Amino acid sequence: MAQKVLAITSCAVGVAHTYMAAENLEQAAEAMDVEIKVETHGSIGVENPLTDEDIQEAEGLIIAADTEISKERFSNIQIVEVGVQKGIQRPKELIQ
């Protein structure tokens, strides 16, 4: 079974960087044969929300955000937390 990773992306404005980071993480995961699901916190709210099942199945969570993301639903999972720019510039590194 492929490794499964979750991610949350968000930028202060909630537009371009949120989705650029999500797209780059998705592309890097595909190239690495890693399953990923990305929840975006954009200007129109939360899209593609992570479910309890997603969280139970995942090996880790990447938070690439410049806004405050509540971590309480992720108490049993390894978290890597960085600014949104790192999600855009270093997606492979974050997935590893």
Image: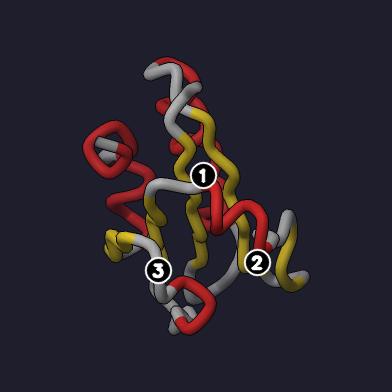
**Three-letter residue code for mark 2:** Gly
- Please tell me which residue is depicted at 50% across the width and 59% down the height of the picture: 9
Q: Which of marks 3 and 1 is nearer the N terminus?
A: 1
* Percent x, y of residue 63: 40, 62
Q: Earlier in the sequence, mark 2 or mark 1?
A: 1
Q: Distance between the residues labelled 3 and 2?
A: 25 Å
Q: Mark 2 points at which residue?
A: 42
**Three-letter residue code for mark 1:** Met
**Numbered label attached to residue 76:** 3
Q: What element carries label 3?
A: loop
Mark 2 crowd level (few <14, some 14–19, many ≥20, 10 Å Cα): some
Q: Mark 1 points at which residue?
A: 20
**Numbered label attached to residue 93:** none
Q: Which of 3 and 66 is in front in this view?
A: 3
**Quarter-wise, where is residue 23 in the image?**
top right
Q: How far apart are marks 3 and 1 (CA)?
A: 28 Å
Q: Is residue 58 left or right of residue 47?
A: left
